Image: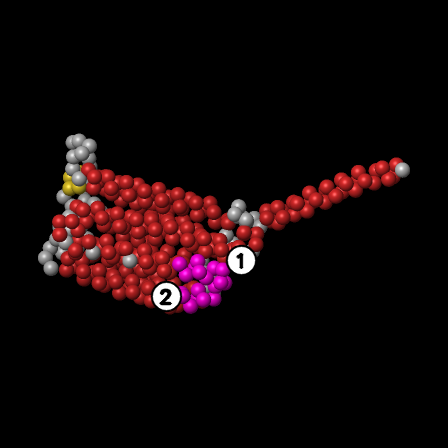
Amino acid sequence: MGSDQSAVNIASLTAGQHDIIYNLLSLTIASMLFTAIYLLASQGRVAPRYRNAVVISAVVCGIAAYHYFRIFENFQESYPPGDTATADHALSNVVFNEAYRYVDWLLTVPLLLVETVAVMALARAASRSLLVKLIPAAIAMIVLGYPGEVATTNTARLFWGFLATLPFIYIVYVLFTELSRSLDRQPPQVRRLARLLPVSLVALWCVYPIAYLFPVFGGDFFGGADGFVLRQAGYSIADILAKAAFGLLVFAVARAQSRLEDPAYADDHGAEAGGEHRGDALAPEVANGERHGARRSVGTGPRSAA
């Protein structure tokens, strides 16, 4: 295959194309940042053994928010405004840097797998066995994908994409065999929700190779500015779903597990101190006791007088 236009050096973007990427990057920053804040603020609503999974989910979103802020800044520098509001945004001497995404994925993809395993509350040996297989494969997948992302020929892009696909297939195999067996031991009330974790993770990850292959499809659309916009949109939307939405799913599984293990966590206000719920539960009894005591006092008074 011949060379194509560099995937990261599109000569110019129309005002509309620029605005689509600009707004999607802004949306992604907000989604990641406020999901991270929500998860950190809500960790007390799950039992202690599941809080690591919720905190890791928040860390994933926090890391992504930081890198998307860097991508946002880089994009503005690479494609500054033209002379008018409707003028094209020509590429400046600052190249749009796709490495920000891959550094983000290098950190967050392994952590996504860690939070998936952590929320299952498996035995320590079982968790360690899964993570030893999943984390190196995730790192290899990202490292092998980057050379293809910045490649200037379709041949190189396909070659590195093929290599990155091998650890991806291995991750899918581990998730749907070993982790699925662990899900069978989960309580029935949680099992259905927990099964969504590996399914949704793999389904969302399938968006990335599709976006990765847009330049290979070629043509004026996929190989040019429109393909660049579509690829950035695909990556951004997939990140929102695979990190922010997935983190909320992990939180939902942790909540379900917590409610089964301790009825105190059925209260939506959480159980940070445990005793707060016990105190709340005792409050009506104390109040009832006081009312009964008051009635006894009132009732005994006249009889004593008599």
Tell me where residue 211 appears, x and y as whole percent: 23, 53
Quadrant, the C terminus? top right
Task: Give the overall secondary structure of the magenta segment.
Answer: helix
Type of amino acid at the residue the image marks with label 1: Leu
For the residues labelled 2 and 1, the Cα–Cα distance comes to 25 Å
**Residue 110 at least partly seen:** no
Tell me where residue 82 appears, x and y as whole percent: 17, 34
Above or below: residue 257 compared with residue 225: below
Tell me the crowding category of disc 2: few under 14, some 14 to 19, or many 20 or more residues within 10 angstroms, Cα based: some
Q: Which residue is mark 1?
A: 260
Q: Is residue 68 left or right of residue 268?
A: left
Q: Element under label 2?
A: helix
Q: Is residue 150 left or right of residue 247?
A: left
Residue 201 within the magenta-colored segment of the rendering: no
Q: Which residue is mark 2?
A: 176
Above or below: residue 14 compared with residue 213: above
Residue furthest out toward the right: 306
Residue 181 within the magenta-colored segment of the rendering: yes
Chain part drawn in magenta: 179-196
Tell me the crowding category of disc 1: few under 14, some 14 to 19, or many 20 or more residues within 10 angstroms, Cα based: some
Type of amino acid at the residue the image marks with label 2: Phe
Give me the residue at 37% from left, 68% from top.
Answer: 177
Figure quadrant of residue 153 = bottom left
